[in-house]
Amino acid sequence: MAEYHFPVPGTIEENKIVLFIHRHWASFLGQFLLSLVMFIAPMVILLILFLSGFKINQGYIVHFMTLGLSIYYLIVITVTFLAWISYYYDIYVVTEDAIIDINQEGFFGRKIAQLSLLRVQDVTSDIKGLLPTLFGFGDVLVETAGEQSQNFLLKCIPNPQEVSAKIMELHNHLVETEQRQSQLLEAEGVLAAGRRPVASEPSPGGSQESPSPPAESPAHIGEVSHEDLDKGGEIQLK
Protein backbone atom coordinates (compact mmCIF):
# COMPACT_ATOMS: atom_id res chain seq x y z
CA MET A 1 0.00 0.00 0.00
CA ALA A 2 1.37 3.35 -1.00
CA GLU A 3 2.21 5.86 1.72
CA TYR A 4 0.78 9.37 1.61
CA HIS A 5 2.09 12.38 3.50
CA PHE A 6 -0.74 14.83 4.12
CA PRO A 7 -1.96 17.07 6.95
CA VAL A 8 -4.21 15.04 9.24
CA PRO A 9 -7.32 16.70 10.77
CA GLY A 10 -6.90 17.41 14.47
CA THR A 11 -9.75 15.10 15.49
CA ILE A 12 -7.93 12.01 14.20
CA GLU A 13 -5.23 10.35 16.28
CA GLU A 14 -2.27 9.56 14.05
CA ASN A 15 -1.42 6.34 15.87
CA LYS A 16 -4.87 4.92 14.97
CA ILE A 17 -4.61 5.63 11.22
CA VAL A 18 -4.32 2.44 9.17
CA LEU A 19 -4.86 3.77 5.61
CA PHE A 20 -4.49 7.32 4.34
CA ILE A 21 -5.68 7.57 0.74
CA HIS A 22 -6.46 10.19 -1.85
CA ARG A 23 -7.44 9.77 -5.45
CA HIS A 24 -5.06 8.26 -7.98
CA TRP A 25 -3.17 10.79 -10.08
CA ALA A 26 -4.40 9.16 -13.30
CA SER A 27 -8.00 10.07 -12.39
CA PHE A 28 -7.03 13.73 -12.95
CA LEU A 29 -5.43 12.98 -16.33
CA GLY A 30 -8.66 13.43 -18.32
CA GLN A 31 -9.37 16.85 -16.79
CA PHE A 32 -5.76 17.90 -17.37
CA LEU A 33 -5.84 16.93 -21.07
CA LEU A 34 -9.17 18.71 -21.56
CA SER A 35 -7.83 21.88 -19.96
CA LEU A 36 -4.70 21.67 -22.09
CA VAL A 37 -6.75 21.43 -25.29
CA MET A 38 -8.94 24.38 -24.24
CA PHE A 39 -5.81 26.40 -23.44
CA ILE A 40 -4.11 25.73 -26.78
CA ALA A 41 -7.18 25.90 -29.06
CA PRO A 42 -7.40 29.75 -29.37
CA MET A 43 -3.68 29.97 -30.15
CA VAL A 44 -4.02 27.37 -32.91
CA ILE A 45 -7.04 29.20 -34.40
CA LEU A 46 -5.19 32.54 -34.44
CA LEU A 47 -2.13 30.89 -35.99
CA ILE A 48 -4.24 29.35 -38.77
CA LEU A 49 -5.89 32.70 -39.49
CA PHE A 50 -2.50 34.42 -39.61
CA LEU A 51 -1.00 31.83 -41.99
CA SER A 52 -4.05 31.98 -44.27
CA GLY A 53 -3.48 35.70 -44.79
CA PHE A 54 -6.54 36.85 -42.84
CA LYS A 55 -5.99 40.41 -41.68
CA ILE A 56 -7.58 41.88 -38.58
CA ASN A 57 -8.31 45.56 -38.78
CA GLN A 58 -6.90 47.69 -36.03
CA GLY A 59 -9.27 49.37 -33.63
CA TYR A 60 -12.11 48.08 -31.50
CA ILE A 61 -11.93 44.54 -32.93
CA VAL A 62 -8.48 43.98 -31.46
CA HIS A 63 -9.59 45.30 -28.08
CA PHE A 64 -12.68 43.08 -28.02
CA MET A 65 -10.63 40.05 -29.03
CA THR A 66 -8.10 40.74 -26.28
CA LEU A 67 -10.84 41.16 -23.68
CA GLY A 68 -12.63 37.99 -24.85
CA LEU A 69 -9.46 35.89 -24.78
CA SER A 70 -8.61 37.20 -21.30
CA ILE A 71 -12.02 36.20 -19.93
CA TYR A 72 -11.80 32.83 -21.70
CA TYR A 73 -8.39 31.98 -20.24
CA LEU A 74 -9.49 33.15 -16.79
CA ILE A 75 -12.44 30.73 -16.88
CA VAL A 76 -10.26 27.86 -18.13
CA ILE A 77 -7.64 28.41 -15.42
CA THR A 78 -10.30 28.71 -12.69
CA VAL A 79 -12.08 25.48 -13.72
CA THR A 80 -8.78 23.63 -13.94
CA PHE A 81 -7.66 24.86 -10.53
CA LEU A 82 -10.99 23.86 -8.97
CA ALA A 83 -10.64 20.36 -10.42
CA TRP A 84 -7.11 20.09 -9.03
CA ILE A 85 -8.23 21.30 -5.58
CA SER A 86 -10.97 18.66 -5.54
CA TYR A 87 -8.53 15.96 -6.65
CA TYR A 88 -5.84 16.83 -4.13
CA TYR A 89 -7.95 17.53 -1.05
CA ASP A 90 -10.48 14.69 -1.34
CA ILE A 91 -9.12 12.28 1.27
CA TYR A 92 -10.20 8.94 2.71
CA VAL A 93 -8.86 7.96 6.13
CA VAL A 94 -9.32 4.44 7.51
CA THR A 95 -8.63 4.13 11.24
CA GLU A 96 -8.85 1.15 13.56
CA ASP A 97 -12.58 1.69 14.14
CA ALA A 98 -13.92 4.13 11.50
CA ILE A 99 -13.83 5.37 7.91
CA ILE A 100 -13.57 9.14 7.41
CA ASP A 101 -14.45 10.82 4.11
CA ILE A 102 -13.07 14.36 3.69
CA ASN A 103 -14.60 16.04 0.64
CA GLN A 104 -13.39 19.44 -0.57
CA GLU A 105 -16.22 21.60 -1.94
CA GLY A 106 -14.86 24.56 -3.87
CA PHE A 107 -12.16 26.81 -2.45
CA PHE A 108 -13.49 27.35 1.06
CA GLY A 109 -15.84 24.43 1.73
CA ARG A 110 -15.07 21.06 3.27
CA LYS A 111 -17.43 18.23 4.22
CA ILE A 112 -16.35 15.46 6.61
CA ALA A 113 -18.38 12.26 7.09
CA GLN A 114 -17.53 9.39 9.42
CA LEU A 115 -18.68 5.76 9.44
CA SER A 116 -18.10 3.23 12.22
CA LEU A 117 -16.54 -0.04 11.06
CA LEU A 118 -19.00 -1.93 13.28
CA ARG A 119 -21.81 -0.93 10.89
CA VAL A 120 -20.05 -2.27 7.80
CA GLN A 121 -21.98 -5.08 6.16
CA ASP A 122 -20.30 -5.51 2.78
CA VAL A 123 -17.38 -4.02 0.86
CA THR A 124 -17.13 -4.10 -2.95
CA SER A 125 -14.25 -3.04 -5.18
CA ASP A 126 -14.81 -2.04 -8.80
CA ILE A 127 -12.40 -1.29 -11.67
CA LYS A 128 -13.93 -0.15 -14.96
CA GLY A 129 -12.45 1.49 -18.04
CA LEU A 130 -9.15 1.61 -19.87
CA LEU A 131 -7.25 4.02 -17.62
CA PRO A 132 -8.34 2.36 -14.33
CA THR A 133 -7.29 -1.02 -15.68
CA LEU A 134 -3.91 0.23 -16.91
CA PHE A 135 -3.03 2.21 -13.79
CA GLY A 136 -4.74 -0.01 -11.21
CA PHE A 137 -7.27 2.30 -9.57
CA GLY A 138 -11.00 2.09 -9.02
CA ASP A 139 -13.90 2.56 -6.60
CA VAL A 140 -14.68 0.89 -3.28
CA LEU A 141 -18.30 0.78 -2.08
CA VAL A 142 -18.82 0.30 1.66
CA GLU A 143 -22.37 -0.80 2.49
CA THR A 144 -23.79 -0.53 5.99
CA ALA A 145 -26.47 -2.39 7.93
CA GLY A 146 -29.41 -0.94 9.82
CA GLU A 147 -32.50 1.11 9.14
CA GLN A 148 -30.52 4.27 8.37
CA SER A 149 -28.09 2.87 5.84
CA GLN A 150 -25.16 5.13 4.97
CA ASN A 151 -23.04 3.88 2.10
CA PHE A 152 -19.54 5.23 1.53
CA LEU A 153 -18.09 5.42 -1.98
CA LEU A 154 -14.32 5.75 -2.16
CA LYS A 155 -13.73 7.05 -5.70
CA CYS A 156 -10.70 6.49 -7.92
CA ILE A 157 -8.38 5.17 -5.20
CA PRO A 158 -5.22 3.10 -5.81
CA ASN A 159 -5.36 -0.65 -5.23
CA PRO A 160 -9.10 -0.94 -4.50
CA GLN A 161 -8.89 -4.71 -3.87
CA GLU A 162 -6.32 -4.24 -1.11
CA VAL A 163 -8.32 -1.41 0.46
CA SER A 164 -11.58 -3.41 0.49
CA ALA A 165 -9.83 -6.44 1.98
CA LYS A 166 -8.21 -4.31 4.69
CA ILE A 167 -11.54 -2.69 5.62
CA MET A 168 -13.17 -6.11 6.04
CA GLU A 169 -10.20 -7.31 8.08
CA LEU A 170 -10.50 -4.33 10.44
CA HIS A 171 -14.26 -4.85 10.67
CA ASN A 172 -13.91 -8.52 11.62
CA HIS A 173 -11.21 -7.75 14.16
CA LEU A 174 -13.33 -5.01 15.74
CA VAL A 175 -16.39 -7.29 15.94
CA GLU A 176 -14.36 -10.03 17.62
CA THR A 177 -12.95 -7.53 20.12
CA GLU A 178 -16.41 -6.17 20.97
CA GLN A 179 -17.81 -9.68 21.42
CA ARG A 180 -14.90 -10.62 23.66
CA GLN A 181 -15.40 -7.58 25.88
CA SER A 182 -19.16 -8.17 26.15
CA GLN A 183 -18.57 -11.80 27.18
CA LEU A 184 -16.13 -10.76 29.88
CA LEU A 185 -18.52 -8.12 31.22
CA GLU A 186 -21.41 -10.59 31.20
CA ALA A 187 -19.32 -13.19 33.04
CA GLU A 188 -18.30 -10.68 35.70
CA GLY A 189 -21.94 -9.67 36.25
CA VAL A 190 -23.12 -13.30 36.66
CA LEU A 191 -20.30 -14.30 38.99
CA ALA A 192 -20.76 -11.26 41.23
CA ALA A 193 -24.15 -12.47 42.53
CA GLY A 194 -24.08 -14.26 45.92
CA ARG A 195 -26.46 -15.78 48.42
CA ARG A 196 -26.79 -14.81 52.07
CA PRO A 197 -26.65 -17.65 54.65
CA VAL A 198 -29.98 -18.62 56.31
CA ALA A 199 -30.03 -19.28 60.11
CA SER A 200 -31.60 -22.59 61.28
CA GLU A 201 -34.79 -22.44 63.41
CA PRO A 202 -35.35 -24.65 66.52
CA SER A 203 -37.70 -27.66 66.16
CA PRO A 204 -41.11 -27.64 67.94
CA GLY A 205 -40.05 -30.42 70.38
CA GLY A 206 -37.43 -28.25 71.92
CA SER A 207 -34.55 -30.18 70.52
CA GLN A 208 -32.28 -28.23 68.38
CA GLU A 209 -31.04 -29.56 65.09
CA SER A 210 -27.39 -29.70 64.49
CA PRO A 211 -26.26 -26.46 62.99
CA SER A 212 -25.61 -26.49 59.32
CA PRO A 213 -22.04 -25.93 58.21
CA PRO A 214 -21.13 -22.28 58.02
CA ALA A 215 -21.63 -20.74 54.62
CA GLU A 216 -18.82 -19.12 52.82
CA SER A 217 -18.40 -15.45 53.49
CA PRO A 218 -19.79 -13.14 50.80
CA ALA A 219 -16.31 -11.93 50.06
CA HIS A 220 -15.41 -15.40 48.69
CA ILE A 221 -18.64 -16.02 46.81
CA GLY A 222 -18.26 -15.62 43.09
CA GLU A 223 -14.53 -15.01 43.16
CA VAL A 224 -12.70 -15.98 40.01
CA SER A 225 -9.14 -15.49 38.93
CA HIS A 226 -8.04 -13.33 35.98
CA GLU A 227 -6.75 -16.51 34.32
CA ASP A 228 -10.26 -18.00 34.32
CA LEU A 229 -11.74 -14.76 33.01
CA ASP A 230 -9.32 -14.76 30.11
CA LYS A 231 -10.63 -18.18 29.06
CA GLY A 232 -14.14 -16.77 28.49
CA GLY A 233 -17.31 -18.83 28.20
CA GLU A 234 -18.83 -20.66 31.18
CA ILE A 235 -16.74 -20.99 34.37
CA GLN A 236 -17.38 -23.59 37.04
CA LEU A 237 -16.85 -22.40 40.62
CA LYS A 238 -15.23 -24.81 43.05
Image (cartoon, rainbow, N blue to C red):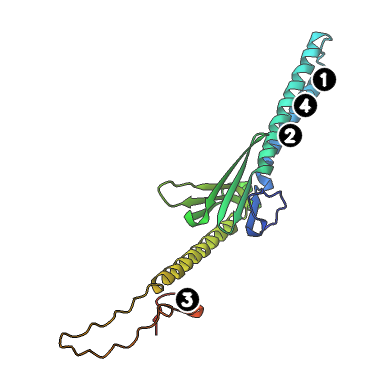
Among the two numbered marks 4 and 2 on one chain, the one whose residue lies closer to the N terminus: 2
| Residue designated by label 3 | 229
* Image depth: mark 4 or mark 3 in front: 3
Q: Quadrant of residue 108?
A: top right
Residue 124 percent coordinates (x, y): 51, 54
Graded by Cα atoms within 10 Å as few (under 14), some (14 to 19) or many (20 or more), the crowding at tag 3 reads some
Judge from the rendering whether residue 156 lies leftward or rightward of residue 3; answer left or right. Answer: left
Q: Earlier in the sequence, mark 2 or mark 1?
A: 2
Dot 1 or dot 3: first in sequence order is 1
Tell me if residue 54 comes above or below residue 202 in the rendering: above
Q: Looking at the image, is 60 positioned above or below residue 182?
A: above
- Please identify the residue farthest to the left as the structure is shown: 205
Which residue ends up furthest to the right in the rendered image?
Answer: 58
Between circles 2 and 1, the one closer to the viewer is 2
Residue 3 is left or right of residue 112, and the answer is right
Can you identify the residue that label 1 sits on? 50
| CA–CA distance in space, label 2 to label 3 | 66 Å
Task: Tell which tag, 4 or 2, sits nearer the viewer.
Answer: 2
The residue closer to the viewer here, 147 or 76, is 147
SS at mark 3 in the image: helix
Marks 1 and 3 sit apart, C-alpha to C-alpha, by: 88 Å
Q: Amino acid at mark 2?
A: Leu
